[in-house]
Image: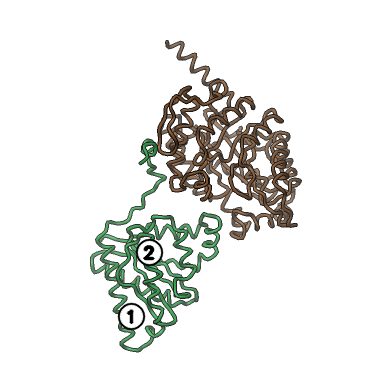
Chain colours: A green, B brown
């Protein structure tokens, strides 16, 4: 069985957090869909709250502290990304943006991604489309067409709504699994091991 | 081992009393600091180059020329010379002139500069940073090594039958270091030419510094300039010392917490763990500096940042006294004892001239 690495980034603030709950369900659904396609999934979850100080420090000093550096590497080296944020002021929260601000440019280029958000009301659901999706478009991630928003009512027992969250999760996870499964496993290029030869730099290429 | 200091040349309010030096005071303070460096037995003084407030040193060769006239022994360097936005023709001329006036006590550390608007102010684009560093330096080398240059490139008006004057002192161009915090291309450039590589590790964690230096060393050997451990490496450092380390921490903390580059970010303790900063006793500075050798191998140049973040001149001069009396003699002795014989010292005008003379003699013998 081949295997792929899925990095899950959760920007939930409270503990326990519904953002993390959604992230875990998306990760589990993606892993099980990949398994159905004959691919093993290694899932790494990054709770951004754990890196709060280091994120601000990185923005101010220009380099990541050791535990943040490890988290950034998990995302860079992953074959697929699940990024989940709570909705703050009609957009992703600051923690979420800080993380993607300090990620090295190009880290997400061509990387399959699934975006999801939680919010206090279903009326925020388009924040995923007008805020989160453009961010990942800029980073040139390959974002699955289905994004998943969950409002408080989705967590209730209210039959139709709850079922529909399950369906949205399954559909989004299926899309991400498809994108991940058809691609070769990520091998991060290392400029320190394979530098651009200087003659090439001299020739302006 | 060359031990010295480098100055950014920032005009920063002293956070303990709100007092900001005038530009005149800061410029004269830089001179006083450079003279003090020679007095306490340091080898190198390097000045930054900046073209925006709150920095004063926009004209490094004017400053270094003045310092050259008032010193006898001190090696004068830059930290860094902007190879991207300066005209390489002007760099060739200015530093050759300085070389003559300073009797060869001159080398340069090339850098790209990271202040966005400086590029457009000088007619360039920051997105071409690496390409500018590559092309401009290639031209600079030719201007110092060929009497008459015909040249055409991407970024500067072409040259036909151009001779850069004065010619380098004794026909020997100044030694060049290439400085970069995070660009493997610059380590590659330094390795390609067999030039020095300087990592200002006060702004980056040691694992990263290690990778950059390792890349430079490997490629230095790849390009046939010698074994990897013979490559010419320089490192930054940043220290604040008092006899008791608690006193050093107490006195330096407000300067650290409000420093322009990293202030209001990581704690002094975290930053000390992660980077080349040491705040403590002279013995702690000695231990930390010696640990750089374990990280980067035997290296040739250690520069300390001493005057920044609003530290008053009086304090900086006290720091230089401690550095000269208690730290540098020990570091000199320890580094010399640890360095294997086949690892070279940092090139100077005298060593480069001697190498050029012996090369000429060898050629005559062959002919």
Determine whether the residue tagged by mark 2 lies in a helix, strand or loop: helix
Tell me the CA gap for discs 1 and 2: 23 Å
First in residue order: circle 1 vs circle 2: 2
- Residue position for label 2: A136
Question: How would you rate the neighbour count of disc 1 (Cα within 10 Å): few for under 14, some for 14-19, many for 20 or more?
Answer: some
Q: Where is residue B36 in the image (x, y as percent from the top left)?
A: 72, 37
Q: In this view, does B267 lie to the left or right of A202?
A: right
Q: Identify the chain of the residue marked 2, using the numbered disc in the image.
A: A
Q: Residue at the spot x=56%, y=53% of the render?
A: B274
Q: Where is residue B215 in the image (x, y as percent from the top left)?
A: 44, 41
What's the mark number on residue B357?
none
Given residues B115 and B249, the one toward you in this image is: B115
- Residue position for label 1: A165
Up-down relation of residue A187 to residue B335 (above or below): below
Up-down relation of residue A43 to residue A127 (above or below): above
Q: Position of residue B120 (x, y in %)?
A: 49, 47
Identify the image quadrant of the N terminus of chain B: top right
Total number of numbered discs in the rendering: 2
Q: Residue at the spot x=46%, y=65% of the render?
A: A97
Q: Nearer the viewer, mark 1 or mark 2?
A: 2
Q: In this view, does A137 lie to the left or right of B184?
A: left
Residue A1 sits in quarter: bottom left
């Amino acid at each position: 069985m081949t295997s792929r690495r899925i990095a899950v980034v959760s920007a939930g603030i409270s503990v326990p957090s519904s953002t993390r709950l959604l992230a875990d369900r998306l990760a589990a659904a993606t892993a099980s869909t990949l398994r159905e396609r004959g691919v093993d999934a290694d899932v790494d979850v990054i709770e951004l709250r754990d890196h709060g100080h280091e994120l601000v420090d990185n923005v101010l000093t220009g380099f990541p502290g050791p535990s943040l550096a490890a988290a950034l590497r998990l995302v860079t080296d992953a074959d697929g990304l699940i990024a989940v944020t709570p909705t703050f002021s009609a957009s992703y929260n600051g923690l979420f943006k800080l993380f993607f601000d300090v990620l090295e440019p190009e880290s997400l280029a061509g990387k399959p991604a699934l975006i999801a958000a939680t919010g206090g009301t279903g009326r925020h659901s388009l924040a995923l489309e007008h805020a989160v999706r453009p961010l990942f478009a800029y980073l040139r991630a390959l974002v699955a067409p289905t994004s998943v928003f969950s409002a408080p009512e989705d967590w209730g027992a209210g039959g139709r709504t709850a079922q529909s969250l399950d369906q949205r999760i399954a559909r989004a996870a299926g899309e991400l699994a498809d994108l991940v499964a058809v691609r070769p496993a990520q091998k991060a290029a290392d400029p320190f091991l394979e530098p651009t030869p200087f003659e090439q730099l001299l020739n302006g290429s | 081992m060359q031990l010295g200091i480098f100055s950014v040349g920032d005009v920063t309010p002293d956070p303990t009393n709100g007092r900001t030096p005038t530009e005149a005071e800061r410029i004269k303070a830089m001179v006083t600091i450079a003279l003090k460096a020679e007095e306490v037995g340091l080898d190198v003084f390097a000045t930054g180059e900046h073209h925006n407030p709150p920095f004063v040193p926009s004209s490094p060769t004017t400053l270094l020329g003045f310092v050259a006239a008032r010193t006898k022994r001190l090696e004068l360097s830059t930290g860094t010379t902007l190879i991207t936005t300066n005209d390489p023709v002007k760099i060739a001329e200015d530093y050759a002139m300085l070389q003559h006036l300073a009797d060869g006590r001159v080398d340069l550390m090339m850098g790209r500069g990271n202040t966005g608007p400086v590029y457009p102010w000088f007619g360039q684009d920051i997105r071409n940073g690496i390409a500018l560093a590559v092309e401009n330096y290639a031209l600079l080398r030719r201007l110092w090594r060929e009497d008459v240059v015909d040249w055409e490139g991407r970024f500067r008006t072409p040259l036909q039958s151009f001779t850069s004057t004065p010619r380098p002192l004794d026909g020997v161009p100044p030694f060049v270091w290439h400085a970069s915090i995070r660009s493997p291309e610059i380590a590659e450039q330094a390795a390609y030419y067999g030039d020095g590589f300087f990592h200002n590790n006060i702004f980056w964690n040691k694992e990263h510094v290690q990778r950059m230096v390792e890349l430079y060393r490997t490629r230095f050997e790849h390009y046939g300039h010698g074994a990897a451990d013979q490559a010419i490496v320089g490192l930054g450092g940043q220290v604040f010392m008092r006899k008791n380390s608690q006193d050093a921490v107490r006195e330096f903390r407000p300067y650290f917490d409000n420093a322009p580059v990293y202030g209001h970010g990581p704690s002094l303790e975290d930053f000390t763990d992660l980077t080349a900063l040491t705040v403590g006793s002279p013995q702690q500075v000695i231990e930390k500096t010696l640990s750089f050798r374990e990280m980067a191998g035997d290296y040739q140049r250690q520069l300390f940042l001493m005057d920044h973040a609003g530290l008053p001149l009086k304090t900086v001069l006290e720091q230089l006294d401690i550095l000269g009396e208690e730290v540098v003699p020990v570091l000199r002795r320890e580094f010399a004892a640890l360095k294997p014989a086949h690892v070279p010292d940092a090139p100077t005008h005298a060593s480069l001239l001697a190498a050029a003379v012996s090369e000429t003699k060898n050629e005559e013998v062959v002919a």
